[in-house]
Amino acid sequence: MPPPTPELAPGPDRFHEPCRQDCPWCGSRRLRTRLRTSDLLHHRPGTFTVDECRDCAHVFQNPRLSPEGLALYHRDFYEGRLEDYTDRLHTTRAGRRRHRAAARVMLALPEPESWLDVGTGHAHFPRTAKEFFTYTAFDGLDPTLRVARAQAEGRVEEAHCGYLAAPEVQARLRARYDVVSMFHHLEHTPDPRAELRAALTALRPGGHVLIDVPNPRSAFARLLGRWWIPYGQPRHLHLMPLDNLRAELEAQGCEIVGTDRKSPHLPYDISAAVGLVLGQVLPKRWLRVAAPLTAVASVADRALAPLLRRTPFSNSYRIVARKGR
């Protein structure tokens, strides 16, 4: 039997970094607490605080988990049923449809010779994108060994295990790719700016970066509060408004090719919130009995998605940028 997982206390300890008094994005000291929440997925002890900058609207975990704390929660996720559930979401008809929509965005641009998908997991996106880019070599980068299994199954040509911003990874991947994609990846990184710089380092001059991230200004964030699944505590460290990410890419010498708040919307806000609430209020043995409630909520998510994606309720956005030559 594995040893019990240590409890994560809300204050400074080996699992947390010191609490910040300023915004990690713009440096402003005008912060406010957006929410406090427990671990709604694994039900570990402890409370996590999400702060928001009053000046630039950047949303971030504060205090932030230390590398040891992050490793603990990533292990829980990737070795548990939630990772299997997430993997199934990518292989459903709706998941494949989202991957195809994201790949089609790049069809208007010159066909890339090489493409790196960061945080690729089991490389479901490269497998789908290959339908449109037959002659493109797709590689995958992921901190887990899932990417090695994806390579063995032929979904990527090269598998790189690690973090994009790590110096040894940057040295290995420098100027190798025409496209670097990051789908719901930046919110997991301790330093999104460093991750963007690393992505541009991996690009050839004139290459493109394709990014999908949660939209912290979604009306669902206000409506659902701690039950809004993209808050993702404690694994989501940063939620960046579109204007912030656009400005940062431009500051790093990129030209913004396009943005989209509609098609990246993921229809799961209501059903995920229902599932989280049920997981908190019902004994585990009753969750299967309550499953029809989640199923009904999922139907509502999908039915409302064509409307919601065109409103402030859209929960994600996409940005495509070209690296300077």
Image (cartoon, rainbow, N blue to C red):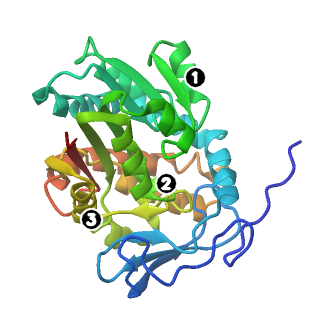
In x, y percent, where is residue 13? Answer: 74, 73
Q: Quadrant of residue 123?
A: top left
Classify 53 as above or below 319: below
Residue hosting label 2: 189
Position of 260 with respect to 237 (left or right) is left
Q: Quadrant of residue 143?
A: top right
Q: Residue at x 58, y 22 (%)?
A: 148
Q: Residue at x 70, y 65 (%)?
A: 15
* Closest to the observer, 144 or 76: 144
The type of residue carrying mark 1 is Ala
The type of residue carrying mark 3 is Asn
Residue hosting label 3: 244
User: Which quadrant does the N terminus fall into?
Assistant: top right
Q: Does label 1 or label 3 sit earlier along the sequence?
A: 1
Q: Is residue 98 visible?
A: no
* Closest to the observer, 81 or 29: 29
In x, y percent, where is residue 107? Answer: 15, 26
The type of residue carrying mark 2 is Thr
Classify 172 as above or below 50: above
Q: Secondary structure at mark 3?
A: helix
Q: CA distance from mark 1 to mark 2?
A: 21 Å
Residue hosting label 1: 148
Q: Are marks 1 and 2 in contact (CB under 8 Å)?
A: no
Q: Quadrant of residue 48?
A: bottom right
Q: Are marks 1 and 3 in contact (CB under 8 Å)?
A: no
Q: Residue at x 49, y 58 (%)?
A: 236
Q: Is residue 47 visible?
A: yes
Classify 31 as above or below 56: below
Q: Does label 2 or label 3 sit earlier along the sequence?
A: 2
Q: CA distance from mark 2 to mark 3?
A: 16 Å
Q: Does label 1 or label 2 sit earlier along the sequence?
A: 1
